[in-house]
Every structure is written in structure tokens, then in C-alpha cells.
Amino acid sequence: MSTTTESAHSSGPSPEIGKSRLRKEDARLITGRSRYTDNMVLPGMLHLAMVRSPYAHARITNIELTEAKAAPGVFAVLTGTDLAAEQGSLPNAWPVTPDQKAPAHPAVAIEEVAFAGEIVAVVIARSAAAARDAAELVDVDYDELPVVMDLEEAFTDAVLAHTSLESNKSATWVFDSAEAGTGTSIEDALAASDVVVERTLYQQRLIPAFMEPRSTVVDPTGEQITMYSATQIPHILRVMLALTLGIPESKLRVIAPDVGGGFGGKLQVTPEEIITLLAARRMGKPCKFTETRSESLQVGHHGRAQVQRMKIGATKEGIVTGLSVNLLADMGAYLGLITSGIPILGAFMYNSIYKFPAYRFECNNIFTNKPWTDAYRGAGRPEATFAIERMMDELATELNMDPLVLREKNWIKHTEFPFATVAGLEYDTGNYEAATAKAVALFDYDGLRAEQKRRRDAGATIQLGIGVSTFTEMCGLAPSRVLGALNYAAGGWEHAQVRVLPTGNVEVVTGSSAHGQGHETAWSQLVADRLGVPFENVEVLHGDTQVSQRGLDTYGSRSLTVGGMAVLAAADKVIEKAKVIAAHLMEASEEDLDFTNGAFTVRGTDTSTSFSEIAFAVFSAHNMPDGVEPNLDSEATFDPVNFSYPHGTHLAAMEVDTETGQVKVLKYVCVDDIGVVVNPMIVEGQVHGGLAQGISQALYEEAVYDDAGTLVSGSFVDYLVPGAPDLPHYITARTETPATSNQLGAKGVGEAGTIASTPAIVNGVLDAIRHLGVTDIKMPCTPSRVWHALQEAKSTGGVQ
Amino acid sequence: MASSTSISVEVDGVSYTDNVEPRLLLVQYLRERLGKTGTLIGCDTTNCGACTVHLDGVSVKSCTMFAVQADGHKVTTIEGMAQNGKLAPLQEAFHQCHALQCGFCTPGMIMQSASLLKENPHPTETEIREGLEGNLCRCTGYQNIVAAVKSVADGVEYGDSGVCVSESLTHEVAKELTDELTDDDSETAGVS
């Protein structure tokens, strides 16, 4: 079934699909007509400031509010006790095991705080400045409690992150291929292997660091409570607010206006949103809370933070016999919306593109006194891909084999699809040979290997390494049945509406809400393609639960493969409805009509009627067929039967200065197969941005804490979000193997770059200096860490 | 309340006289007093550059200036860049080159790019990257931003095909890299 085609701007099945349409959403964003939440000003609006705990674990013994309440412009100061009857406990939608443990999580802490930055009081004032000034006057007494910051230490339960829990362990989740019937026993497989390589790898804690700090405005005036929020998930947020606060869902309207990036970091129901809503309801006035960047870095949920104990077995010919994965996953102090499920999403991806006969995965979800972790671009899958791709390189070293050769010996051949994996998924299509061949050619793999050898032989100061990463991922979250089987509370469908206006203009309502991904453009292309109306005549509406009444929002590279398919299905229903009316208007039989280029034509004649003529006929309704409603509007809900499985091969040429530890990306080539592409320009942008974040995990970013639990990297001075000089020029290309799980053949692309690039970079760094005795460097591979690794290798006699 | 000071500022061609608190930042004055919400706030440490505007034609981060420091000066924000309904070249370039996704860094990025090109009308790719060092973008990975700025410097005429400039740039840079690698051989690897 698989086909591979040249992809660069190839024309798709229609003029719209496969066309790099410039983005509709740019016009407002490049001129400053943006509508981010913090831009919002409403009459009588009050402002909130949060009082946050400076301690990572403490008991609150007293809160003195007198001075703060008396400060100029202050309307109220509220504590957790004040809100106890209404604030509920923040939701976790993914109890991964029936016995999962989780502490109660009130938006404003009442008795105990479990991470530095947890909210203990809230000030409501006339201006943001007045609120912040008064927040300084709130005097809180704490009894400090022991903190546990290190994940491996937390696993021992020597110190408890919560006094209310008996253990730091939230849940243990296991997948075993022998038990699942998807493979053989890992113990037997490893025992029979010629080689077993064992490594412990570390996923540092990352901060999503979207550019727009989170902001929420709640308007309690009128019949409904309206929340504007910088969120990825207006629909899920509405349901969760209703369930958490006991407000009828119909009395809540959530609007995500322009949202300045998310990357998973705005896939959350936050304390700040709950508090702003409760404050607005109490005051009867609109309330706004906008976090500072320091607050954003400190308390917005983080990502990654895992310890990965890996064992891989193989024959001496390089055929992998089995893989064992044992994870510790840092939940932080509380479970967020899908905190507990993030490492589990990785469970299905450690086997990656390979045919492993045996596989065992065990994950322990552990509490620490750090802020919660949750989705961050890739969510479980970058961790899995990093670990397996690092292990494949370690195995290649052990077997003295080229890393690409080892991979090819083990990967699923393009003739073997569909392929049931040892982790229990069915990969529908793929062509790893084609993507790799193209990457190797673009990269000049042989030339760079020769150059590497020259530098090694010459003992050059600047050594060269080649990092390989071949990957696949499961995205397009998701088949609802699969999510149900994993005990996730919600489904994975998506909803769309296509509304035909009297003039023939079309409104498309989508449940997947964009925050930079270009839905307004891509969805217009889909509908222009299907209905034959001009691209310009399509308007895409999203991000407001009153306009888009059903939806499951944007994450997991799901928008096109799930939401886009709902749009196409709704458009198809419009055509079906229009056909009946067209036949009536032309006094022809429906069976004799063709629909092309936005018009119905009676086959074999030149009699036709255009889409806009039908739209107006429906509006006037003077001449409708008997029993047919004067309405072309249609809606559809799409629930995929399978994930989509984009894949690709990424190659990084890394230079390492052996005297300074400085690392440079000399060349980066990626060939991604994301199936059929609607807008190549947008796709390339997604790839670039994904690469930047993945490369940045490898080289730059880490949330660092001191022993007391204070975030040391708490501002953009200390947390290195790379700037333009810190990132390379990416050389990108595509191969195209259509997915079979949706009618377009599309796969997700939002996370691919992030998932694939981190191991490519680290493998490249290690490949450059492995001959000097360096076998591992913890991420991020800063000059200091690289230099120390080189010195350590030298002192232990690793240098040749 | 703190005392207030009278300032006169010209912003995007309009003169304003206002009383402001001495601690009021220029960006707060623009956003909260003048409603110039096109200029955005992304951090509190002058690292991200989202708030970049021009003061007398030179880029400044408006979160690092007090409003009172702008007294008697001319400020241009992203909202003043288009003239008579026509986009400034950099605005057009950012659109054509897909140099924005979520758009939050974009106003600052365009203002900084304009300042960069004024100082150095024909920058190399490296000079563009270094010139934008103080402006963070989390979406684009910078490649298309660099391409947009370069396209303005090069006077590129955009077709109507909507094809991203970076595709052609990719091959150009791939070639440059290969050349650079060949040069580096002799210098760093000691190979003749």
C-alpha cells in the first residue's frame, strides 16, 4: 500500500490541498490588531494578584490580612479557608490505575503547601499594581516541613511530599508483551541475548515557556459567566469548571481568543482560572489575572522529568531480542489534568519503528515537592524516542556497527505494513527506507563520516559527531475507545460545523482551537477544496464555546487528522443536502448531477447551478422541494479508528570543541513523512518550531532547583529559551506515505520535530567524543557538562 | 498613591499629554493608557523583546523604560508601521515568509528587525540572527524570521504562489554549509 513521492510543493489531488496558502490569521497579528486575553478591558474590571508560598513544603499556621485589606484600592483579600466551600479540588482526568493516589488540590491552599509558588491568598484590587502592592502586605506564617526534590530519592519514601499520603507513589503502570499476547517474555529474551546493554537515562525537567504569559478575564455580568482565557482547551475547560465548581455547564461560556503559543503548557485547568472565576462571581464585577513571566516559569506546569532505566538485548548480528523500560516519572506535587497519563503515552512508543519480539514497560508515578508536570510538546513520546534512540546508538557501539545499519536491521520494512507492534498498536503505513535514504543523501552521510575520521585521525581540537534519530510517533489523539481502555475520562473525537450563508459564503466552526497552528487557513483550504467556493469566502470560527458548542480542542497533533476530517465530513453533508435542492431547481434527477468546482451540472448538458445560487435559493426558500428543510448547514463528529503514525529520519552533524566543551550544530537534516499535506508552508513551520524545542532540550533548557525547593532558573535570565543565534539552519524534506486512518491520508506534524531531534543531537555530541572515552552526558549538554565529561574520561584513562 | 508627572509623547503620529505615575513603564502607558495593545508583554526581565517599540526611530524595549523617560520623544509601535493602509515591507515579509505562528513575539520582532535593517541594510544571515538575539520566539525556530528579514534586505519581490522563501534559502544554506565545511577542514582538523 505504501507509496513514496517527492514532496516539495508537489500538487495534491486538488488546487487547494497541497498549496502553500499564506495565512489568513497573519493580517491581524502583524499589524497589532491581536486579541490576546491580557488586551481585554471590561467596565469596572478588577485585578488579581496571588500571594504564593516561598516554601516547597510547609504548614500554614496563620495568615494576617489586616494591612493588605486596608491598602489603597483593595476590594478583598481571600484565603483558602474563605474559598473552601466553593473551590473544590483541581481535576485529574486520567486515573491510570484503579488505585491511583492523589492529594486533594484546592486552588488556594488551606492547610499545607507542597511546592514553592503554591497560592495561599489572593488580592482583588482596582489595578494590577494595587493588587501586587497589597499582596506584599499579606503576612503568612509557615511551619516548614521536610522537602523531597530528587525523583530517585522520592521513590524511596524517605521523605514524603505530602503529609496526607503514606507514600510518594501515585501509581504503578505495567505493560508486558507476554501478558498482553503481543510478544514473548522479556526475561527469557534478555537471558538468551548475546549482548545486553543497560543504561540509566535522565529526562530533565523542562518549562514550556510559551511567549504569552497565561491570562484570564472572567465576566460575571449577564446570564452566563464568561471566561476569556489563554488556553488550548476552551471546551474541556468549560466541562471541568462545571464539574469542579458545581456551576451548570450551560451557565458557563469559555472563550480562547488569540492565544500566544501553548505547546501543551496551556492544556490545563489552572488554579488561577478557578480563582479568577470565583473572585468575579463574588465581586459581581469582571476580574483579570495575568501572570508575570516569573510566575509563569515557576508554577505553569512543566514537562518531561523522568528517570529511564533501560535494558536492551540483541544477537551478535544486531537483531534486537527485547527491550525493558523501567521509569520513574515526576508528577510534581499534584496531578494536573493529564499529568499521570503523560509517561503512559510513551509506553507505546519505546519500541518505535522496530520489530522487537519482547517488551516490558513499568512506570512509577512519583510525587515530589516541585510544581506539577503535564503535557509538553510530544508528551511522553519524546522521552520514549530519546531513550530508544540513545539505546540503539549504545548497542551499535557495543556491536561496533554503524548506527544506521543497526536500525535498518531492526526496523519494519515498508512491505510489512500494516504491522502489529509489540506494544499493541497497529501501524497502518510507513516507509522508513525511503525517508532514511533521502536524509542520508541530503546530509552527505558518507562524506561526513569521512570527515569525522579525518578529524579523529588528526586529533583535531574540534571533533565531529553524527547523530542519528529514526522515529515514529502515535498522534492525532485519538480513537475514543483506545482512550477509554487507558482509563482517560474523555473521548478523542472532534466536531465541526459548516454553515452556508445566503451569499454563498461559508462559515466553518471547528472544535479544535488554534494557538498558532494556522487552522483558519488550513480549514479554509479544506472547505474551499470540497465545496469549490473561493478560499477567501470561507471564514473559520473557533475558540468560543458559544460559537463552537462541541469540541475537544488542540493537542497531540490531532487538529487536522481528527478535526480536519470532521470539517470534511460536514462539508460532504452540505453537498448531499445541496444536491437535493439543485436537482429540484434544475428539474433533473439527483443521480444525473455532477458536483465540480462549486457547481452542480446535469451530466451531458451545460445546465448547471452554482453553490451560491443554491445558497440563495435556500435563504429565500421560495422554491424548495416538498419536505426538504430550507437549510444547508451541516455538522459532523469524527472519531478516528486509529492513531496516525508520522515518522522520519533526522541526522545531526555536531561539532564539539574538546578544549572548551562548546557544542555546535554544523548541519541538521530531517526528512519527515507526515502523509498527505494540506499546506506545505505551515507544515514546514511546524517542523522548524518542533526542531527548535527538541534541540533546545538537548543543549539548553533545564528547570533547576536548589535543595530547599526554590526554582533557580525562574526567569528568562536563567532559563535558556534559545534565541536566533543559538539555533541552526534546518534542512527539511518530506516523503509521503498516506495514512489509512483518515480520508485525506494525513498524519500529525505538530510534535514530530520535537520528538525526533533531541536524540539526534545528543547522539551526535557523544559520537564526536566517544573515542575519547565519553559514554554519556546528561541533558542539557552545556559546555560545562561536556567539558567535565571530557576531563573525567581523561582522568579515568579513557583518552586514546 | 504616588505623585504623578505630566508627559508629552507622540505615539504613532498622535500627540498625547498625560499625567503618569513615575513608576509607570512605557509599555504599560502604551497598553493601559493609550490602548495600544498591539505592543505585548512577554517577560519581566527585558529578555523576550515582545514589547519592542521605536523611540525616535531606534528600537527600545518598552518594559525597560519608564513612561516619563519618553517625555518629549516620538514613539512608534507596531500599530504605526503600516502607512495609508499599506503594510511596511517587514510586515509583508513576515506574512509572505510564514515568519509567525502564534504571533505573540511578532510585533517586537518586526520592530527590532526594522531597527536592525536601518543600522545594517544588507546583513548576512549571521548578522540577522545576532541582531535579533534580544527577541525570543518559541514557535518558528527563527528560520523563517531570518528569511523574512533577508528578503527585505535583498528587495525580494514575492510571487502570488505563497511559497515560503525558506525553501530556496534551505538549498542555498546547504551549499554554504558544505563550502564552510570544506574551509573548516584545513583550519580545524589539520587536514591538508
Image (cartoon, grey):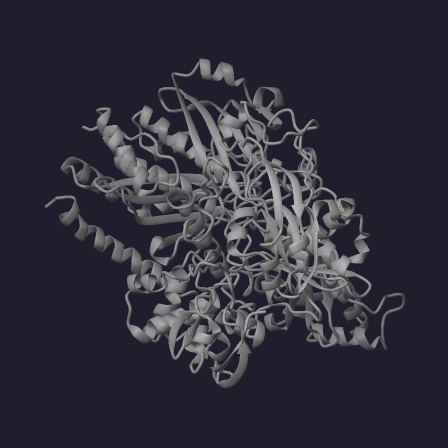
Of all residues shown, which one is farthest toward the left? Answer: B192
Relative placement, left or right, of A57 versus B73 is: right
Task: Identify whether A668 is placed above or below A395.
Answer: below
Q: What is the quadrant of the C terminus of chain A in the image?
A: top left
Question: Who is closer to the viewer here, A540 or A267?
Answer: A267
Percent coordinates x, y for residue A779 in the rendering: 39, 38
**Residue A648, visible in the rendered structure:** no
Question: Who is closer to the viewer here, B97 or A444?
Answer: B97
Task: Please give the name of the residue rendered at 16% of the width and 46% of the height, measured from the top-left corner.
Answer: B188
Relative placement, left or right, of A20 versus A560 is: left
Task: Identify whether B89 is placed above or below A260.
Answer: below
Of all residues shown, which one is farthest toward the right? Answer: A627
Percent coordinates x, y for residue A164 in the rendering: 67, 30
Percent coordinates x, y for residue A321 in the rendering: 45, 21
What number of labels is visible?
Answer: 0
Relative placement, left or right, of A168 versus A800 is: right
